[in-house]
Amino acid sequence: MNDRVLVLNQDYSPTAVCSVQRAFILVFMNKAELIKKANDKCIRTVTHSFPMPAVVKLNRYIHIPYKSVVLSRNNIFKRDNFRCQYCGATDDLTLDHVVPRSKGGGTNWKNLITACKSCNAKKGDNTPESAGMLLENKPYKPSYIMFLRDFSGFIKDEWRPFLVQNGKVKVG
């Protein structure tokens, strides 16, 4: 019962990820309806058996103000898959300003990347181009839906129709 459940708003837009227990209570109290059940899993009581939810939809539309992902060290590491964006290393990680602050670079999603300490020291107070280093991925501001998707580290098959659009994961 440590699984996670995708919660959809009444318009089928993803709003949260919650525990199976919480999702079951929402369905049982008629505050949500079961959209997709987890494959071959059920919740058993002494006298009943209920399908284990994988995706539930709220019965009332909940207005949620625009949610953005907080700029933090850990969220940048998550966005970059805990890998150095120069060499791909996964140990001894730190943050790097693509355009150094001394050269007018800001502290924002599009200028911060994950870098290992040796690549960060090698780049120094230069841009990647002037240091002769290539970025594996261009930094970007992730959407809230991307962080919902990455909450448990993967997309469950049952979630795909609600998080994937035209074969690609929705980004906003």
Image (cartoon, rainbow, N blue to C red):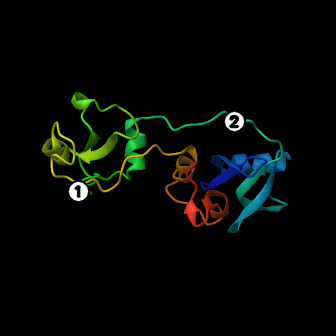
Q: In the figure, is residue 88 to the left or right of 108? A: left
Residue in view at x 58 percent, y 67 percent:
167
Q: In the figure, is residue 50 to the left or right of 158? A: right
Q: Position of residue 19 (x, y in %)?
A: 64, 49
Q: Nearer the viewer, residue 62 or 169?
A: 169
Q: Is residue 44 visible?
A: no
Residue in view at x 77 percent, y 59 percent:
35
Q: Nearer the viewer, residue 87 or 125?
A: 125
10 Å crowding of disc 1: few (<14), some (14-19), many (20+): some
User: Circles 2 and 1: CB distance less than 8 Å?
Assistant: no
Q: Can you say whether 157 is above or below 95 in the image?
A: below
Q: Position of residue 24 (x, y in %)?
A: 75, 51
Q: In the figure, is residue 159 to the left or right of 85? A: right
User: Under tag 2, what secondary structure?
Assistant: loop
Q: Is residue 24 visible?
A: yes
Q: Can you say whether 108 is above or below 24 in the image?
A: above
Residue in view at x 37 percent, y 45 percent:
77
**From mark 2 to mark 1, how far is it between C-alphas?**
39 Å
Which residue, given by chain and number where applicable, does mark 1 sit on? 87
Q: In the figure, is residue 27 to the left or right of 75? A: right
Instruction: Identify the disc placed on residue 165.
Output: none
Which residue, given by chain and number where applicable, does mark 2 sit on? 64
Dot 2 amino acid type: Ile
Q: Total marks drawn?
A: 2
Q: Nearer the viewer, residue 139 or 27?
A: 139
User: Under tag 1, what secondary structure?
Assistant: loop
Q: Position of residue 10 (x, y in %)?
A: 79, 47
